[in-house]
Image (cartoon, rainbow, N blue to C red):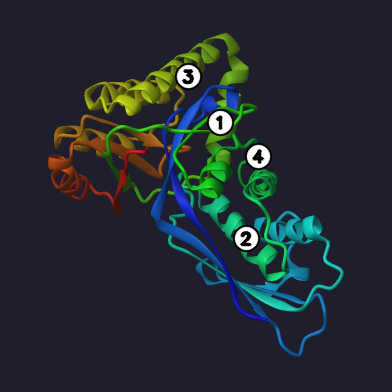
Amino acid sequence: MPVIFGKAPGKIILFGEHAVVYGQPAIAIPVLDVAATARVTPLLGAGPGRVHVQAHDIHLDTLLSDLPEDHPIGAAIRATLAEITPEYTPAFTIQLDSTIPISAGMGSGAAVTVAIIRALSAFLGRPLPDEQVSGLAYDIEKLHHGTPSGIDNTVVTYQKPVYFQRGEALQTLTLSHPTHWVIADTGEKMPTRETVSAVRDLHDSAPETYDAIFAEIGQIVRAARQSLAQGDLPRLGGLMDRNQSLLESLQVSSPSLEALIAAARGAGAVGAKLSGGGRGGNMIALAPPEKVRQVEKALKDAGAVRILTTILRETT
């Protein structure tokens, strides 16, 4: 049997994080410059069903049978096998690699899961369609995030910019002009599960107050969708800045994020905000093409440990 590969990109949220968990829309895009890769290789000479799991990035080298039931990598493998229920499962090794920063709001967990599902289902001769891949990945996301919105698995599976609202049909974005997004990593790791839980506690303490904040974020997302379609950068920038202010009200910002946001704005970005769970991880800035290098330098000088620029191109 040949070696089979599966791959999935990172993602970044442009608007709507946290509020998306409470029924509001969000906008997210794939980041194709980083990716998770799964490689499945036949394990010759071993008995049927023996599965060797390697993920050097997290120092994992073990048998599937030794992984706890709630381990996300083990759960992704088991869920794929359960979905396919092959009559015969050959022994194999699955090797995982990723260039997506962990606990930085870029969908690393979902990307690893999608890569596993794609590689393993293809190895077993039954490659799964996107809808099934995304659904399985969503179930595994619960182990990463507790109460996932569904946006990570959707974006990394379909690899398209999406307007996402839980319970609604998937909508891809229509874009008339390219936009340049500069992503900067604070270097501070904060699992999304923890920030989602903290926001839930805030909401439970004063539901009306926080529902109003979520509703305003939802209005921002809807306006941003129109502005993206029209290529209206000044309006998009203002919407980003307002979204950031509301995220600060949810107590998910941090001094390091705000320092990078200020640096980006000072260097010519038309708007900037945190992206993802917050309290660390990444921020994102919208830069006019002629200001991209200037914004990148300012972010580096302000202490960003990693900077990545991605272009969201027009669609037809």
Cα–Cα gap, marks 3 and 4: 22 Å
Q: Which residue is mark 4?
A: 146
Q: Earlier in the sequence, mark 2 or mark 3?
A: 2
- Measured as percent of width and height from the top left, residue 77 is found at 71, 62
Question: Quick one: label 4, few (<14), some, or many (20+) residues within 10 Å?
Answer: some
Quadrant containing the N terminus is: bottom right
Q: Say what secondary structure mark 1 lies in.
A: helix
Asked whether the viewer can see residue 60, the reply is no
Residue 218: give its label.
Answer: 3
Residue kind at label 3, given as amino acid type: Gly
Q: Which residue is mark 1?
A: 198
The answer to whether residue 7 is above or below residue 191 is: below
Label 1 or label 3, whichever lies nearer to me, is: 3
Q: Which residue is mark 2?
A: 118
Label 2 or label 3, whichever lies nearer to me, is: 2
- Measured as percent of width and height from the top left, residue 208 is found at 57, 9
Quadrant containing the C terminus is: top left
Cα–Cα gap, marks 2 and 3: 33 Å
